[in-house]
Amino acid sequence: MTKSKLIEMNNVGVVVENLDNAITFFTEIGLTLEGRMMVEGEWAGQVTGLGNQSVEVAMMVTPDGHSRLELSKFLSPKTISDHRTAPVNSLGYLRVMFRVDNLDELLIRLEKQGFEIVGEVVNYETIYKLCYIRGTEGLLVGLAEQLNNKTVTDVLENNE
């Protein structure tokens, strides 16, 4: 049998309480709503292990079309835990990071809507200006502006 090869990362899933607010927030960052639908029934529960479920899903896509964020609102079964406001060093998937072209302008718009920077905006190795923010429902979101043609891969290769 031929060994399987990873092709791409399809999406990252985020569970929210208010799907409309989450769509608005991620649209403000620059993602586009690709589609919205209900995912229901026993077949879906067989994949997730939750049994019969009813979930409203919105798929957000980045401008390059390569990355997606799947926003889900569970109608049933009800959500059972909440780690949205956990710090970044907690176990599990806790943040998603996006590269933007004008971090300062985006932060002004987001702060006007009440979203706050966690910590401060920093300059990493003159490669990225970046920060974390608490977005809609307290979700932790990383934002990074590339400052030159170097990437983190360049830094990692030089440290080997």
Image (tube, helix red, strand yellow):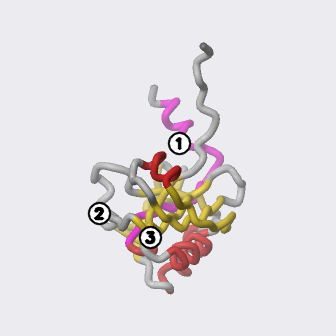
What is the C-alpha distance between the residues marked 3 and 2?
14 Å
Which residue in the rendered view is the most extreme toward the right? 64
Query: Which residue: 52% across, 50% down?
Result: 43
- How many residues crowd around disc 3 within 10 Å: few (fewer than 14), some, or many (20 or more)? some
Q: Amino acid at mark 2?
A: Ser
The tag on residue 81 is 2
The image quadrant where one finds the C terminus is top left
Mark 3 or mark 1, which is nearer to you?
3
Asked if residue 20 lies left or right of residue 81, the reply is: right
Q: Is residue 36 magenta?
A: no
Q: Amino acid at mark 1?
A: Val
Asked if residue 6 lies left or right of residue 137, the reply is: right
Which residue occupies the foreground of this view, 41 or 154?
Answer: 41
Q: Which quadrant of the figure has residue 32?
A: bottom right
Residue 86 in percent (x, y) is at 29, 62
Image vertical order of residue 46 relative to residue 30, above or below:
above
Query: Which residue: 50% across, 86% down?
Result: 112
Residue 83 in percent (x, y) is at 31, 62
**CB within 8 Å, label 2 to label 1:** no
Q: Secondary structure at mark 2?
A: loop
Q: Which residue is the site of mark 3?
A: 75
Q: Amino acid at mark 3?
A: Leu
Residue 84 seen: yes
Residue 76 in percent (x, y) is at 41, 66
What is the C-alpha distance between the residues marked 2 and 1?
34 Å
Q: Which residues are magenta?
A: 138-158
Q: Which residue is the site of mark 1?
A: 152
What is the C-alpha distance between the residues marked 3 and 1?
40 Å
Mark sitting earlier along the chain (3/1): 3
Query: Which residue: 49% across, 34% down?
Result: 156
Query: Which residue: 52% across, 64% down?
Result: 71
